[in-house]
């Protein structure tokens, strides 16, 4: 009994607590619902306000775009109207010009008719006067003209013959004596040595064992050397010496210097040969430039363009009929300067033109045409004056000589080349034949270089590997041989060898 009341009190307390909690939770939920409804109404009002604002902005943008479009339309209409006005004015101007042209045409037509009428009247007057003169002189026009021309021609011929005879006698009395004296003095003042130019060079070897190293294993060194330099190496029984044979003196000199350096270095293999040959070519260019400066200094010819000195130096390795062209040019400068001084001509022009008169020979294998005109064009482009270029162009009568200096260059050239032993025609013809062989080979597309070796009995043609494949190399060899047969004359037979080499290069880093 005592336990029932406490239990009942506890149950009633729990029930009351639960009811209180329920009422509190219900009140809290109603409050949250009210807040949510208020927030929803606020968001709805904000959305309506934003919608109204966006609608207003859209209307304003639409109005702005409409105004811009209307402005553009008005501007375009204005431009169109201006163009229409301008076209209308041009049309009016053209109409006026056409009307003026028509008036001028009518005026000229009337003038032509009037001129024709006057011309007819003048011809009639001339005919009447001519008829009256013929009646008075009892001769027609042709007869009178023939009589006058005959008398004038006879008198002119007689007077001209008399004057020519007098001038010839005066010139014969003075020119031969003076010419011999001037040429004799020039020759006496110029003493030049002559060295026979040959097509081979000999390289001395320290020992016979080096011949084997030059040849290399299975001949790879000598083949590489010949392909790179274009020079034929002759290894024979000559003790401690090998011979380099090539018609091009520059190539032969490069090969000689390269082989000398290889022998001193001791390393002889294809890669080293190519490296030394390339370095030797660069060194030889420096030597060529120094040679040009030297001969210009010796001839006392100043203010020449550096490129002109370089081209002049290349003549050191060029021959003409066996005569060294650079030495020949220097001697011509001395001779022309001496003769110009005796005659009172321009000494500087004569010496400059004589020194440069054969520079066309340094590039005549690259440029078509006579070497005199080629040299004159080079001198003109590199700053020489008109008197010098004319003397260069006229020294073989490719141009008609117009100045005293031009005739002096011809005389100096003839004196220098005409000395006994100065020239040999056979060597020049031999060189021309080898150059013609190389020119025929290089005239085909895809050919990189060509070398005439074995005294012209073989032509080695090096091609671009990316342009000529192995099959086309066979066709190229046959085509080159056929062209040589059709265009050149030569003894025996000529072997055509086409070389196609592909290299793969990479670097280890």
Image: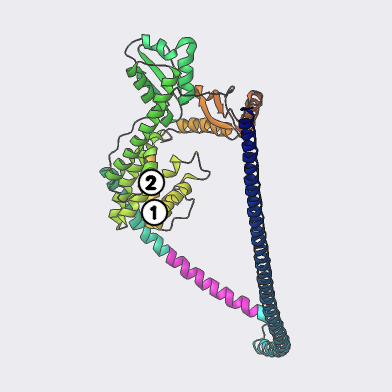
Q: Which secondary structure is most common in the magenta stretch?
A: helix
Q: Which mark is residue 55?
A: none
Residue drawn at the location 43% of the way across and 67% of the way down: 163
Residue extending farthest left = 189
Q: Is residue 50 magenta?
A: no
Residue 223, image x and y in percent?
A: 49, 18
Classify residue 5 by image quadrant. Answer: top right
**Which portion, as a residue range, is magenta?**
143-164
Q: Is residue 149 above or below residue 460?
A: below
Q: Nearer the viewer, residue 395 or 389?
A: 389
Residue 38, image x and y in percent?
A: 64, 57
Residue 502, image x and y in percent?
A: 56, 24
Residue 100, image x and y in percent?
A: 70, 87
Q: How is the image coloured?
A: rainbow
- Nearer-N-terminus badge (1/2): 2
| Disc 2: which residue | 308
Could you tell me if residue 11 is visible in this image? yes
Q: Which mark is residue 383?
A: 1
Residue drawn at the location 31% of the way across and 42% of the way down: 293
Specify whether 271 is left or right of 65: left
Q: Is residue 83 above or below residue 28?
A: below
- Helix, strand, or loop for circle 2? helix
């Amino acid at each position: 009994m005592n336990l029932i009341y406490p239990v009942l009190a506890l149950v009633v307390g729990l029930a009351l607590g639960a009811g209180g909690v329920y009422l509190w939770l219900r009140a809290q939920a109603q409050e949250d619902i009210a807040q949510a409804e208020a927030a929803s109404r606020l968001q709805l009002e904000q959305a309506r306000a934003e919608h109204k604002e966006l609608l207003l902005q859209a209307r304003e943008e639409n109005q702005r775009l409409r105004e811009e479009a209307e402005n553009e339309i008005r501007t375009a209409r204005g431009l169109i109207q201006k163009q229409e006005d301008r076209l209308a004015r041009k049309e009016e101007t053209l109409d006026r010009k056409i009307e003026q042209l028509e008036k001028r045409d009518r005026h000229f037509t009337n003038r032509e008719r009037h001129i024709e009428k006057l011309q007819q009247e003048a011809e009639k007057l001339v005919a009447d006067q001519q008829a009256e003169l013929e009646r008075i002189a009892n001769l027609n026009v042709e007869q009178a003209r023939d009589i006058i021309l005959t008398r004038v021609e006879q008198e002119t011929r007689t007077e001209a013959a008399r004057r020519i005879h007098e001038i010839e006698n005066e010139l014969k009395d003075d020119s031969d004596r003076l010419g011999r004296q001037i040429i004799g003095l020039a020759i006496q003042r110029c003493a030049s040595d002559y060295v026979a130019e040959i097509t081979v060079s000999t390289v001395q070897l320290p020992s016979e064992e080096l011949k084997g190293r030059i040849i290399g294993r299975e001949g790879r060194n000598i083949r590489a050397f010949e392909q790179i330099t274009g020079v034929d190496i002759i290894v024979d029984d000559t003790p401690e010496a090998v011979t380099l044979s090539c018609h091009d003196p520059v190539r032969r000199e490069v090969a000689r210097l390269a082989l000398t350096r290889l022998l001193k270095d001791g390393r002889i293999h294809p890669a080293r040969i190519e490296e030394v040959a390339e370095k030797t070519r660069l060194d030889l260019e420096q030597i060529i430039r120094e040679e040009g400066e030297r001969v210009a200094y010796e001839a006392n010819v100043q203010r020449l363009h550096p490129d002109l000195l370089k081209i002049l130096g290349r003549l050191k390795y060029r021959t003409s009929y066996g005569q060294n062209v650079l030495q020949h040019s220097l001697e011509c400068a001395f001779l022309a300067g001496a003769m110009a001084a005796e005659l009172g001509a321009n000494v500087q022009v004569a010496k400059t033109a004589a020194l440069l008169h054969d520079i066309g020979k340094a590039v005549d294998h690259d440029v078509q045409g006579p070497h005199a005109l080629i040299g004159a064009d080079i001198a003109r482009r590199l700053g020489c004056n008109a008197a010098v270029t004319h003397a260069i162009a006229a020294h073989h009568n490719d141009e008609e000589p117009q100045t005293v200096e031009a005739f002096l260059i011809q005389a100096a050239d003839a004196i220098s080349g005409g000395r006994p032993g100065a020239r040999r025609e056979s060597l020049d013809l031999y060189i021309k034949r080898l150059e013609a062989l190389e020119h025929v080979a290089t005239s085909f597309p895809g050919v990189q270089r060509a070398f005439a070796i074995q005294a012209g009995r073989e032509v080695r043609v090096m091609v671009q590997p990316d342009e000529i494949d192995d099959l086309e190399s066979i066709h190229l060899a046959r085509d080159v041989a056929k062209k040589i047969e059709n265009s050149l004359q030569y003894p025996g037979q000529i072997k055509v060898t086409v070389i196609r080499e592909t290299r793969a290069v990479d670097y280890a880093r």
